[in-house]
Image (cartoon, rainbow, N blue to C red):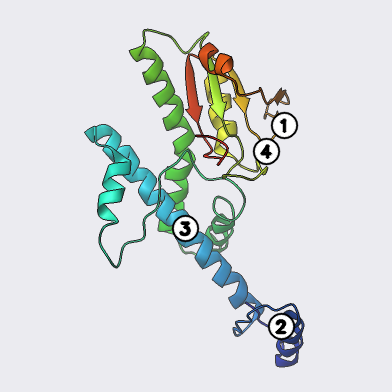
Amino acid sequence: VLGGVARSCMEASAALSRRAGDTVVAVAAPAAVEMGKLVENTLRAGNSGLVNEIALICDRLELNVWEIIEAAATKPFGFMPFQPGPGLGGHCLPIDPLYLSWKMRGMDYETRFIDLADKINTSMPHHWVEKVQDALNEQGKAVKGARVLVLGVAYKADVSDVRESPALYIIEGLRRKGAEVVYNDPHVETLRLESGEDLSSVTLTDSELQRADCTVVVTAHSAYE
């Protein structure tokens, strides 16, 4: 997607991009290019916020959110299935829409959908810390002193990028409650926490799984069953 300050800029940029075999979509100006990216990012962040809220609702209603989404997705048109998760990571979804929100505040406009989605998405790591606590309680165990194995710390499957990864907040939240947290990630050998402490990925073995009081799949890498 290209927009030039002048038409000649647009034509030159388009010609260069087409030499690389790209499909070129021309818009009116560079600001329109950036806004187009923000709309795409914001739509996904907003839909993620909605489905994460549905997950919170289903949790309270004791319904299986995965089953609910699968049932809703049987509609042959007009429904785009999103999956709930531990929160958003990377830059495009959790960060970029907030630039637009900040810009609009300076123009006396409140971006309600963006702000609400951000509030829900950033609350999800805390929700999953509570779910671990509940699961341990059901086994008669406290979080303090429990060994928790986190599977996947990258912000999405099959990458090594940990920017804004919700796994970081889940690990920190469990550690604050006194849990002994270890992690495995085939793509992330070491992980630096906000405290400055470094953790190293443990080898995923049967014995490591058996040592854990609770195992949490945070990132669904294809290496995991």
**Nearer the N terminus, badge 1 or badge 3?**
3
* Residue 168 appears in view: yes
Q: Residue at x 46, y 44 (%)?
A: 121
Of the residues shown, which amino acid type is indicated by label 3?
A: Arg
Circle number at residue 44: 3
Of the residues shown, which amino acid type is indicated by label 1?
A: Glu
Per the image, label 4 sits on a secondary structure element best described as: loop
**Nearer the N terminus, badge 2 or badge 1?**
2
Q: Residue at x 65, y 43 (%)?
A: 163
Q: Residues within 10 Å of mark 2 (few under 14, many from 20)?
A: few
The quarter of the displayed image where residue 204 is located: top right
Do the residues bearing badges 4 and 2 touch, measured as CB atoms within 8 Å?
Answer: no
Q: Residues within 10 Å of mark 1 (few under 14, many from 20)?
A: few
**Nearer the N terminus, badge 3 or badge 4?**
3
Quarter of the image with the N terminus in it: bottom right
* Residue 178 appears in view: no
**Nearer the N terminus, badge 4 or badge 2?**
2
Q: Residue at x 24, y 36 (%)?
A: 63
| Residue corresponding to mark 2 | 18
Circle number at residue 189: 1
Apparent side of residue 75 relative to residue 188 in the rendered image (left or right): left
Q: Nearer the viewer, mark 1 or mark 3?
A: 1
